Amino acid sequence: MTQKFGFVKIKSGIHKGKIARYIGNDEKGKAHISFRYDQDFLSWPVYSQVPKSVLNDDISLIDIIDRYYDVVGDLNKISLKGHPKVKKYSAKHNELICESHLLRCLLKEYTSIHQLQFKEKETNIYLMSSFQDLFLVNDLIAELSLNHWHICHYDHETQTAYHLEHALSMCSQFVFVLSQHYNERDMHQEYQEILEKKTDLQQVTFVTLDQDIQFNEDSLYIDRKSDSDTLRRKVLELEKRFMNYDSH
């Protein structure tokens, strides 16, 4: 790894698989890492030291999503039924909370519209959803990313900046992920704006997570409880809609 400060994934050792922030070295040459996204003060320090050889600063969106699922799974075990190795309110529990915040912030960075490149417009997707559906939306983003699509994700509850105007110049596909959580008024407003300004080469597609919420008869239904194989088939069906539209 080049000695560059910033976010890293840990390849081996007791922190294997985790994502952290590389912040410096100690006098013995070991790397200082933090599981906090920033320097906010919390009840426990969340730092550790590891050999620099176990750090890798090549982090993919899939790395972040995979680790996010692991951390959320551990936090759910701690909160709901107990974790075999981590006690509630312990320093380890606090570390997981900090890392979950770090991962959520990195997800926003990696799916920001500022990560898109105009030269890749044909494979750029502007995906809109509710924050409350983030867990399944992350699955969609991961599958699409594996198939070489570039996704900008916008959710209404936590993102205040409005990027639709920029997205219209950068993206070929616009995907609404509808559910009981998605504000209907917001959706209609965004849909109308896209229709008014998009070109003939840009497409709008609707995915719904609730069968009783259908924008039109062409909406693609994805069950929230879909296993990985079913979800992969649904994503392939979604991609076919992109391709069929492009061939018209």
Image: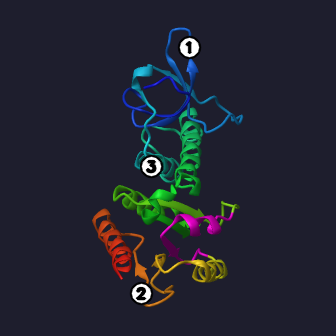
Q: In the image, residue 219 lies at what x, y percent?
A: 44, 83
Q: Nearer the viewer, residue 88 or 118?
A: 118
The residue that mark 3 highlights is 61
Q: CA distance from mark 2 to mark 1?
A: 58 Å
- For the residues carrying marks 2 and 1, which lies nearer the camera in this image? 2
Report whether 198 appears left or right of 158: left
- The quadrant holding residue 99 is top right
Label 3 sits on a secondary structure element that is helix
CA distance for labels 1 and 3: 30 Å
The residue that mark 1 highlights is: 26
Considering the numbered disc 1 on the image, is that residue within a helix, a strand or a loop? loop
| In the image: residue 218, left or right of residue 78 | left
| Amino acid beneath label 3 | Leu
The answer to whether 135 is drawn above or below residue 108 in the figure is: below
The percent coordinates of residue 93 (x first, y second) are 55, 39
Q: Which residues are magenta?
A: 162-182
